[in-house]
């Protein structure tokens, strides 16, 4: 079973409940690779979504203006998507910090559910978001 690193992010949920918790995988983000703009919107990363859309359009237009072949343009687009996939979860963590979420502990687990389970074993007052 392959184990992955997960980072936790905490946000105060209110006076009488524990903190809300988000768990973010460390590593490549397949949804961001395939659905770049939609992925950013889904996570409420508005500026990132606009920049990714602009970057995608710039890569496409730049390849066309440079007179690259269709194969070269496809390779350039694939490279851009790989860059996004490798950076996406880091961008998400930075976005959470800017919105007031605090960094929690890191958890090693096989999947998201196992990571949440291990996290909540240590602190039962947390609320999953």
Image (tube, rainbow, N blue to C red):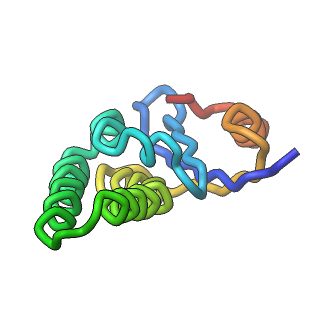
- Closer to the camera, 112 or 107? 112
Tell me how many marks there are: 0
From the top left corner, tell me how far across and down residue 92 is, in percent: 40, 52
From the top left corner, tell me how far across and down residue 106 is, in percent: 66, 56
- Residue located at (16% from left, 67% from top): 62
Q: Is residue 123 visible?
A: no
- Left or right: where 23 falls relative to 100: right
Quadrant into which the N terminus falls: top right
Q: Looking at the picture, does residue 81 appear above or below residue 49?
A: below
- Residue located at (47% from left, 26% from top): 16
Q: Residue furthest bottom?
A: 66
Q: Is residue 14 visible?
A: yes
Q: Residue furthest right?
A: 1
- Left or right: where 81 falls relative to 69: right
From the top left corner, tell me how far across and down residue 77 is, in percent: 34, 58
- Residue located at (41% from left, 57% from top): 78
- Closer to the camera, 3 or 13? 3
Q: Looking at the picture, does residue 24 appear above or below residue 106?
A: above
From the top left corner, tell me how far across and down residue 6 is, in percent: 64, 51
């Amino acid at each position: 079973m392959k184990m992955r690193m997960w980072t936790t992010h905490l946000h105060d949920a209110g006076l009488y409940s524990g903190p809300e918790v988000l768990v973010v995988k460390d590593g490549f983000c397949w949804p961001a690779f395939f659905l770049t703009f939609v992925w950013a919107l889904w996570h409420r990363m508005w500026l990132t979504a606009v920049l990714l859309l602009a970057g995608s359009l710039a890569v496409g237009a730049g390849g066309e203006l440079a007179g690259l072949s269709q194969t070269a343009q496809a390779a350039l687009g694939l490279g851009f998507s790989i860059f996004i996939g490798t950076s996406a979860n880091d961008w998400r963590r930075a976005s959470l910090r800017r919105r007031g979420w605090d960094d929690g502990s890191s958890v090693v687990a096989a999947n998201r559910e196992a990571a949440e389970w291990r996290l909540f074993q240590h602190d039962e007052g947390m609320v999953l978001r």
